[in-house]
Image (cartoon, helix red, strand yellow):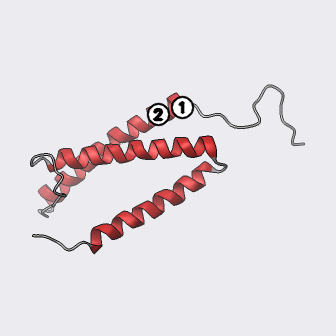
Amino acid sequence: MNQIQPGRPATPTVDAKRLWAGGAATALVAALAAVVGLLIVRGLLDIPVITPATTVGNYQAITLAVGAAVAALIATALLHVLMVSTPRAATFFGWICVLATLVAGSAQTSRPEKW
């Protein structure tokens, strides 16, 4: 039997505090992963990394870390909005992330390189 149990809400609720705590933790991990990735690519593989002209000073690591953290927080905000407003929020979020990654990847490869 599928009956709604008394005392439980018919619609799922979002624990915003826990969601944003997870988003902040993800932002920290993304920032650290960006720095470690940059160090591996530049240090171990000896591949030059060119960042956009909006780089803060000459600090590529800071620019990449801040960008990764901001992207994680934007993703958290998007997921929060989807969880509040749509059914099957995880499916929509997955599709949006895949399509945004494809757009970002194609935008990076279609620009002429400036050396």
46 relative to 78, above or below = below
Would you say 32 lies left or right of 21 here?
left
Tag on residue 20?
2
Q: Nearer the viewer, residue 85 or 11?
A: 85
Q: As drawn, which residue projects farthest toward the right?
A: 1
Would you say 7 lies left or right of 103 here?
right
Q: As drawn, which residue projects farthest toward the top?
A: 7
User: Which amino acid, by three-letter code, is at mark 1?
Assistant: Ala
Describe the element under mark 2 as helix, strand or loop.
Answer: helix
Whether residue 65 can be seen here: yes
User: Which amino acid, by three-letter code, is at mark 2?
Assistant: Trp
What's the residue at 61%, 40% (across, down)?
84
| Residue 55 coordinates in the image, percent (x, y) | 16, 51
| CB-based contact (under 8 Å), mark 1 and mark 2 | yes
63 relative to 44, above or below = above
| Residue 47 coordinates in the image, percent (x, y) | 14, 64
